Amino acid sequence: SAVISQKPSRDICQRGTSLTIQCQVDSQVTMMFWYRQQPGQSLTLIATANQGSEATYESGFVIDKFPISRPNLTFSTLTVSNMSPEDSSIYLCSVEDLSGSSYEQYFGPGTRLTVT
Amino acid sequence: ELKVEQNPLFLSMQEGKNYTIYCNYSTTSDRLYWYRQDPGKSLESLFVLLSNGAVKQEGRLMASLDTKARLSTLHITAAVHDLSATYFCAVDRGAQKLVFGQGTRLTINP
């Protein structure tokens, strides 16, 4: 199974600032996904990060607010820009395990962001 | 637009009892996932269901899929306290992009 790490695990930030979240996978993957989980809520897909091309954003999410980088097949970053308290959430990256035929999708440990 | 609905959203049950969580989805999909989330933790993958009639079991949990009815169930047998968590179903809308249900918060009382 894919092993995913994220940095930082949590942070408290002031409104108006930006935070970059890192996601590292222990194997090469074609697509990496970023999800948001607002307090007490379910998960919502923010964007899909493909190596060598622009990220694809879901409705309601824009590149200016959530710029994404994907420099190689094992790493991606998500930046939360010009933060407001409404951005307080857990941000998770996810990948599909391509090592077999399981079609498993794994999630990183998450980054818990609090904006004050 | 694919919609995924779980019920119940909250479930409190006694140890030793059986219960079922339901996951309905609105459009055809090839894959359905079940995850567990403990408070303050990430998601733990439980099951991936790929075809109509698929049934998978792990310990006291069993998941099934009826693609014609667009329904998946997660059945809990003889519940124990350690199974207390929030359970999510998620449906692949294509290209590995998941749409999640609201989650079912399960509390199992001794």
Image (tube, rainbow, N blue to C red):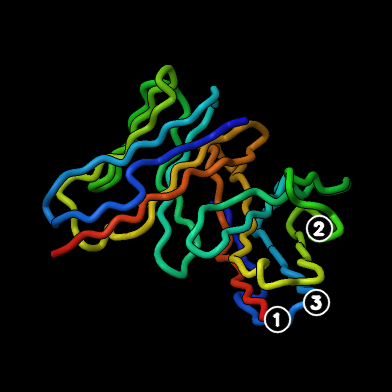
Name the disc covering residue A37, or none.
none
Name the disc covering residue A13, or none.
1
Position of residue B96 measured from the top left corner of the image (x, y, whole percent): 63, 38
Position of the C terminus of chain A, as image quadrant, is bottom right
The residue under the point 57% across, 35% down is B92
Q: Are marks 3 and 2 in contact (CB under 8 Å)?
A: no
On the rendered structure, is B98 left or right of B84?
right
Mark 2: few/some/many CA within 10 Å (<14, 14-19, 20+): many
For the residue pair A101 and B103, the one nearer the viewer reads as: B103
Distance between mark 3 and mark 2 Cα atoms? 18 Å
On the rendered structure, is B10 left or right of B6?
left
Position of residue A87 measured from the top left corner of the image (x, y, whole percent): 67, 67
The mark closer to the camera, 3 or 2, is 3
The residue under the point 56% across, 56% down is A107
The kind of secondary structure element at disc 3 is loop
Query: Which residue is identified by label 3?
Result: A16
Q: Pinpoint the chain carrying mark 1.
A: A
The three-letter amino acid code for the residue at tag 3 is Gly
For the residue pair A100 and A46, the one nearer the viewer reads as: A46
| Residues marked 3 and 1, same chain | yes
Mark 1: few/some/many CA within 10 Å (<14, 14-19, 20+): some
Q: Earlier in the sequence, mark 3 or mark 2?
A: 3
Q: Pinpoint the chain carrying mark 3.
A: A
The residue under the point 62% across, 58% down is A36
Position of residue B94 measured from the top left corner of the image (x, y, whole percent): 64, 31
Q: Earlier in the sequence, mark 1 or mark 2?
A: 1
The mark closer to the camera, 3 or 1, is 3
Q: Is residue A109 above or below residue A42?
A: below
Give the quadrant of residue B84: bottom left
Query: Which residue is identified by label 2?
Result: A68
